[in-house]
Image (spheres, helix red, strand yellow):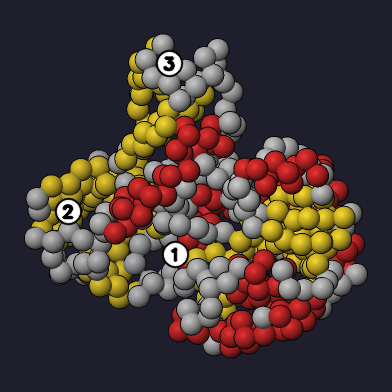
Amino acid sequence: MKLIPTILSGGRGARLWPVSRELHPKPFIRLADGQSLLQKAFLRAAALSDVAEILTVTNRDLFFETADEYNEVNTGQLPLGFILEPQGRNTAPAIAAAALTVQRLHGDDAVLLVLTADHLINDQAAFQDSVRQAVQLAQAGKVVTFGIEPGHPETGYGYIEAQGNEVLRFVEKPDLATAQSYLASGRFLWNSGMFCLSASTAVRELDQHAGQTLAAVRATLAASQEVNGSRRYQIELDAPHFTAIQDESFDYALMEKTQAAAVVPCNIGWSDVGSWNAIGDLVAADDNDNRVDGDAVLYDSHHCYIRSHDRLVGAVGVENLVIVDTPDAVLVSHRDRAQDVKHLVDQLRSNSHEAYKLHRTVHRPWGTFTTLEEGERFKIKRLVVTPGRSLSLQMHHHRSEHWVVVSGMASIVNGEREISLGPNQSTYIPAGCRHRLANPGKLPLVLIEVQSGEYLGEDDIVRFADEYGRQ
């Protein structure tokens, strides 16, 4: 039996703003132990038995950061597959694309274990036992979901009414009184959004209950590009085909309609960590029930969660606050209103404010850049280029650049010249000049870039050659 853990990763970055952003969503958030939620999902999957590869469905723009996250923890060098979406279309098309790919590469009997990239599971042994039960049901032709045994009445989750492994019905998020009655009955489980099913079962059931979606995904895959490398492949879904597919959840498209549904009730220490209160609960409390992740000093303050990794936060005489500090944005919220952060993100998006989308530090396929300061006709950045990576061969119409190497070695194309620079050395690149920056060494290359010109937007770039497939 081949087990293919399939990690669905993405999101809008709304509920955990300002740490999460549209291009740095919740799966990339690092917890107090230094690991991201995405890395924890990967390690959880990699520890299972009979894993043939780990498949990830994510947005095209998040591919390189996702691959870098995996490279940090994939010590066993498991084979990796990536299905890259041009735009999110919800879980039904994502799982359909994964099922068709797994069926083609691994056969009808391969079992998909569909996992979310941004949930937390604290009991690995219980998780592995639940997966074993789910695989047995999947091999018998069932479409299996994982139902979390509820510990309290929760209005933020959907529920499953179950009897043993039999699904009686799915119900939407209830009000508090209904949730209390569900808990008292002992028949209801939280819907975790995780699934287990064979490739052939997935294709058969989707064909029966969501045939239009399955056919559209087939057409998309037929028109898509696939790149195969050493122990890794990636499929970039064709944008015109995929974006025309109906946005639909797997629960609605299949689980609520199929006669093959089954559930594994489990108690695995699961949380969807869907709010700053949930993140705060992962941090030990002091004597005043304050939880601090980072650097903070508090006086006469109670029941607060403070996260600040870049500078000191002081709090005096406050209660029940969430304070989250990042280099370019600060969130202050009453703990009872932490779920409403998404409304701030909606306002930022409607105002075209970049803080909904990007951090001051932005990930690129070659590394990162951090905007240190900007003003009229100038911008100063700190670039970190990963060993062995290079920027595209490019040109800017409206700005010139001055590069100063801080550490590492730089290989530079500057017009007709090819030069190497070490620490404290620099070069000037005028507007209209073709140039390229690469790190040929084994250590990160760090340099300061000073831009000057009449327009300094990121879209002032003409690429002549790019190893990452960008236009």
Disc 1 versus disc 3: distance between alpha carbons? 41 Å
- Of the residues under marks 3 and 2, which one precedes in the sequence? 3
Rendered location of residue 452, percent (x, y)? 12, 54
Q: Mark 3 near mark 2, Cβ–Cβ under 8 Å?
A: no
Residue type, mark 3 in image: Ser
Location of residue 330 with respect to 453 vertically, above or below:
above
What secondary structure is marked by label 1?
helix
Q: Is residue 208 left or right of residue 318?
A: right
Q: Which residue is mark 1?
A: 61
Q: Mark 1 near mark 3, Cβ–Cβ under 8 Å?
A: no
Quadrant position of the N terminus in the picture: bottom right
Residue 42 visible in this rendered orientation of the protein: no
Q: Is residue 415 left or right of residue 439?
A: left
Q: Which mark is residue 147?
A: none
* Label 3 neighbour load within 10 Å: few <14, some 14-19, many 20+: some
Q: Which mark is residue 301?
A: 3
Location of residue 107 with respect to 448 vertically, above or below:
below
Residue type, mark 1 in image: Asp
Rendered location of residue 438, percent (x, y)? 36, 58
Disc 3 versus disc 2: distance between alpha carbons? 44 Å
Q: Which mark is residue 451?
A: 2
What secondary structure is marked by label 3?
loop
Disc 2 versus disc 1: distance between alpha carbons? 25 Å
- Of the residues under marks 1 and 3, which one precedes in the sequence? 1
Q: Nearer the viewer, residue 51 or 279?
A: 279
Comparing labels 3 and 2, the label whose residue is closer to the camera: 3
Q: Nearer the viewer, residue 122 or 43?
A: 122
